[in-house]
Amino acid sequence: MAFDIEKIRADFPILARRVNGKPLAYLDNAATTQKPRAVLDAMQEYYEQSNANAHRGGNALAEEATEIYENARKKVARFIGASPTEIVFTRNATEALNFAARFCAEQMGAKRILLTEMEHHSNIVNWQLAAKGKSKIEYVKMRSASAICKEDVVGLSADSVFSFTHASNVLGTVNDAALLCRLAQKTGAFSVVDGAQSVPHMKVNVHGMGCDFFAFSAHKMLGPTGVGVLYIRNELADTLTPMFGGGGAIESVALSSTSFARAPHKFEPGTQDVAGAVGLTAAIDYLENVGVSAIEKHVAALHGTCIDGLKEVGGVSVYGNGRKTGIVSFNVGKLHAHDVAQFASDDGVMLRAGHHCCQPLMKSLRVSATARASFYLYNTEEEVGRLLASVKRAKKVLS
């Protein structure tokens, strides 16, 4: 369909809000996105019409809930170029990355863990916990606020795992995931990709990428909180033992032992968030109806306008290149990022400020924090203008 920004904005009830007496300009989409009415309605309809425990019993509602849940799995698989049996629903991308780390360190024999300095804490802390002093963790250094260079990815081997972000939540930089995964494949190393910032903004095909694991969250792509996805390559999934046990994940149980179901069900014990899966399905439908490429073009235009405007303000440092992901991380002279964000909030403009759960990256950039604007399909040129006006006001008052 044609990209109609006013029609799109009308689909998001929260955008009618006022904050501090000003119209809401929500520019914190890298943290979480707002939800269109289609997602809210789909989840409510499920609870009102089809609520039951999936995979639990032969009654009509249970069968209906099961079909809805498994159709959601198929939808997610198609959206990222995977097979349904490779899709495991989790609570969020962080939990998915924790699973991947535990699998690699505890079951797949990874003795060396290679990460990058641009990782979110959810792709650092999880590996530190999984390593338990038995696996060595090393980092690809940042040459600058840019993508990871293949020349810096060294020392991989068959007992290694390389885990990296597809797109940085601070820099907006998009790494060449297919290239980096090929580097891992050539050495026999496993690859884990954090796709939390990439899936909402670009076409992703995990089979084409060649990764072993891939993680992302529903809430960063118009879906609900509490639902994430872990892709596990089929050949690996069949060899892995579940981290948790319980109903729905088993084939049979005796007093002394248990045999588990096939993937992905063996990784999903207990009652699953069927409504969350419904919401994610509705979000995918919405994104596809608008068009991922159209969204990417719109976001890139907003990003360009913002960068040009910040240059005109003067004395502003911008980090990375988030044209594809709509991320603009910046600092205004010696002003603290929190002060810049507070001025914007007073004007009804929602930014984020701080280290963005990327303290090692902040150290590499030699800053303690940045202010961050992040754009998505419902943002407008007028909102960019309001952001720039707030930055100018903060600079004038505080400098």
Image: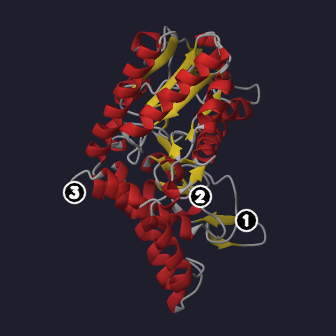
Q: In the image, residue 309 lies at what x, y percent?
A: 40, 22
Instruction: Classify 10 Å Cα crowding around label 3: few (below 14), some (14-19), many (20 and above).
Output: few
**Which residue in the structure is indicated by mark 3?**
1
**Which residue in the structure is indicated by mark 2?**
267
Q: Say which amino acid is labelled 1.
A: Ser
Spatial CA span between label 3 and label 1: 54 Å
Q: Earlier in the sequence, mark 2 or mark 1?
A: 1
- Give the numbered dot on residue 257: 1
Q: Which sits in the foreground, 86 or 339?
A: 339
User: Which tag is nearer the camera, tag 2 or tag 1?
Assistant: 2
Up/down of 254 relative to 351, above or below: below
Q: Are the residues flagged by discs 3 and 1 in contact, CB closer than 8 Å? A: no
The structure residue drawn at horizontal position 63% and vertical position 65%, both measured from the top left corner, is: 259
User: Which tag is nearer the camera, tag 2 or tag 3?
Assistant: 3
Q: Which sits in the foreground, 113 or 294?
A: 294
The structure residue drawn at horizontal position 47% and vertical position 72%, both measured from the top left corner, is: 41
Q: Earlier in the sequence, mark 3 or mark 1?
A: 3
Q: In the image, residue 85 lies at what x, y percent?
A: 43, 59
Up/down of 172 relative to 336, above or below: below
**Helix, strand or loop under label 1:** loop
**Helix, strand or loop under label 2:** helix
**Helix, strand or loop under label 3:** loop
Q: Earlier in the sequence, mark 2 or mark 3?
A: 3
Task: Pick the quarter of the image with the C terminus.
Answer: top right
Q: Say which amino acid is labelled 2.
A: Phe
- Confirm whether residue 214 shows in the render: yes
